[in-house]
Image: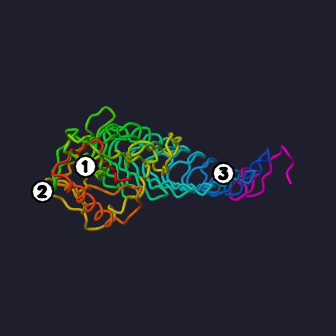
Amino acid sequence: MAAEGAASYCGEMKDQRRNGYGRYIYPNSFFKYEGQWKQGKKHGHGKLLLKDGSYYEGEFVDGEIVGHGLRYWASTGNTYSGQFLFGELHGHGVFHYGNGGRYEGEFSYGMREGHGSLTEKDGETYQGSFHDNKKHGGGKMTFPNGDKFVGDWILDQRQGHGVLQCSDGTVYEGQWRNDMFNGQGCMIHCSGVIYDGLWHNGSPLGQAKTMAIIGPEVIDASLGSVLTFHIQLQTDNGEVSKSERGRLLEITARIKKITLPETSSHESLEATEKQHFSKFGSPSYPLKLVRSASQSLQSVSLVVSKSGHAGPEAVTSHEKKPGLETKDKGGSYCFGLPRLQRSKHGLVTFRNIPLAFLLVPDPQAGQLPEREVERQSARASTEQMEASTSFMVRRSSLLSLHNIDD
C-alpha cells in the first residue's frame, strides 16, 4: 500500500521511465491508472480510475485521453462510449443517461453539437441538429402520445417553419415562435374544421367567436314554405372569419302558439334562442390554445399534450356515420339532413329547407330518438299550420344554431 501523499508505480520500465504495462497510484490517491506507458507517459490502452468509482477506459496519447474510450460517472450513472479529445467528449459517440435517456451523435468539447438522435426517458425522440447541447436547426420530434413535428428549432424551441401531425389526425403547417403557433399557418382539425390565417401564441387571430343569421328580423312564411338562411361566423369585432372553413353547423327551430289580438290574422312562432357553449366558456371551437411542455397552462380547463396541441372533444354521431356527406353544385356540404351544413370561409347557407323540417319538439317533453323527433316535429308543425295560411316568423326567436364539431 502506498502512503497518503506518496506516488507508487508497479510495472515495466525502460531507461528509468515507465514503459510498457504498469500500475500507477497518484500522490493524492484519488486517481489510479493501469495500462500502457511510453517514455513515462500514459500511451496506448489503459484505465483511469477515480476514488468515487468513476472511470475512463480507452485510448491515451502522450499522457492525454485521446481517441476512442468509455467513460462512467458514478454519481449519476451516466456512461459515454465514443471519441475523446484531451479528455473531452469530442466526435461521434453514444451517451446513456442514468435516468434512461440516450443520445447518439456528434459532440464538440463535451457538448452535443451537429447531427444526433436524442431519446428521453418517457419515449420522446428527436432526430436532427444540435448546437450548444440544445436542439437547434432542422429536426424531427416524436412525442410519447404519437404526435410528430418536423421543422426548425432554435435553442430547444420550435421556431421558424414546421409541420405538426397529431395522433388524432389534426395537422398544422406554418410558422412557429417560442414553441407555439405564431405567424401564418394552416390547421386542418380532425373534426374537419380548417383555419388558414394568422396565429398568436397558439391561438388563431381570426377565429370565429359568434354565429349570426343574416337577413330581415321578420320573415313571412306561408303554408309549406321552403326557406333559405344565410349564416356568418364572426370574429370578436364582427368581421366574417374568412380564414375558417369546414365547421359543421346545425339549424333547428321550435314553435310556440300564442294568442294575438283579434285584429291580427297571423300566428307567431317563438322560441328561446340558444347558443351551444363548450366547457371553455365560449362558443365551441375546436382550435384551442396550445403551449409547449415547458410552459404553464393558461386558464382553460383542457388536457394539452406535450407536443403543444390541445385535443378537441369527441365528434358527434353525424361525423361518424359513413356515406352521409354529400356535396351540392354550389359547393356546400350536406350530411344527409338539410339542416346540417359545413362552413366555407366563414359563411354557411341552408338552402331550400321546409319550415316543418326545422321544427323540433319542446325539450321539456323528454328525449326521443332522432327519427322519432323528426316525424313528430313535422306532424306537430303541420297540424298547427293548418290553422292559418300565413305566418309571421320572428327569426331571432325562432332559430337555434349549434356547432356540431365539439
Q: Amino acid at mark 2?
A: Lys
Per the image, label 3 sits on a secondary structure element best described as strand
Per the image, label 2 sits on a secondary structure element best described as loop
Of tags 2 and 3, which is closer to the observer? 2
227, 202: nearer the viewer: 227
Q: CA distance from mark 1 to mark 2?
A: 15 Å
Q: Amino acid at mark 1?
A: Ser
Q: Position of residue 381 (x, y in %)?
A: 25, 57
Of tags 3 and 1, which is closer to the observer? 1
Which residue is the site of mark 1?
343
Q: Position of residue 371 (x, y in %)?
A: 31, 67
Which quadrant of the rendered structure holds the N terminus? bottom right
Residue drawn 40% across and 38% down?
177
Circle nearer the N terminus (2, 3): 3
Task: Sort mark 3 into few (<14), some (14-19) or many (20+) by Cα contacts within 10 Å.
Answer: many
Which residue is the site of mark 2?
329
Which residue is the site of mark 3?
42
